[in-house]
Amino acid sequence: MTTYTLHLAGDARPGDPAALERAEIVKDGFSWGAFIFNCLWFFYHRLWLAGLLVLVVTLGLDLGLRALDVNPAAAFVAELLLAILIGLEANSLRRWTYERHGRPAVDAVVAAHRDEAEARSFARWLQQAPAPRQPAPSSVLSPSPVFRAGPGAEPVIGLFPDAERPR
């Protein structure tokens, strides 16, 4: 069984089926596509920065190994280890990118395959009751109170604690 995360827009309301139109399900585990295709996998998933970083690191390793005249077997092992590292971290970079773009993980499910994970997470999302909308607090309607700690003390504005007592 594998863990999958559901990523939705940050303003998505629980129970809203329209929010699932652009949902992304990301597997938590090794990515064979990233292992085999490296930066092309990142570009396919529109992970531009991560794809460029992987491309630069891969080319840098290759050029460094050639400049040092490393044994071809050792160079192959080094490049294989880099590909394994990329395969291990690819989905984590994908989740990080979604989070950075305002699409946080809203649910995590354990399933045997992607379709089952999608069905479970969508069903859990739709079972949640939509939260009632609350109006945004307005600073114009409720100004910050001004407090005084004692006679002749400087005023304390906003959320600060009481002014320090004289010693």
Image (spheres, rainbow, N blue to C red):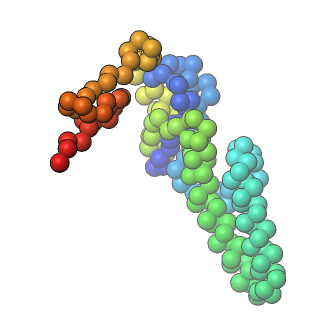
Above/below status of 76 relative to 35:
below
Q: State left or right for residue 93 relative to residue 59.
A: left
Where in the figure is residue 158, as x and y percent of width and height? Answer: 36, 29
| Quadrant position of residue 36 | bottom right
- What residue is shown at x 30% (from left), y 33% (from top)? 154
Front residue of 16/160: it is 160
Left or right, 106 with respect to 58, comes to: left
Q: Give residue 107's quadrant in the image.
A: top left
Number of marks present in the image shown: 0
From this viewpoint, is residue 48 visible?
yes
Residue 5 image offset from top left, x and y in percent: 50, 41
- Whether residue 167 sits left or right of residue 143 in the image: it is left
Farthest-out residue, left: 167
Identify which residue is drawn at 59% across, 58% down: 89
Q: What's the residue at 56%, 52% (across, down)? A: 92
At horizontal 61% and vertical 65% (from top left) the residue drawn is 85
Q: Extreme front residue here?
A: 152
Position of 145 relative to 24 (above/below): above
Left or right of residue 10: residue 73: right
The relative height of residue 148 versus residue 74 in the rendered view (above or below) is above
Q: Is residue 15 visible from the viewing direction of this image?
A: no
Residue 152 picture quarter: top left
Q: Position of residue 166 (x, y in %)?
A: 20, 44
Which sits in the foreground, 113 or 15? 15
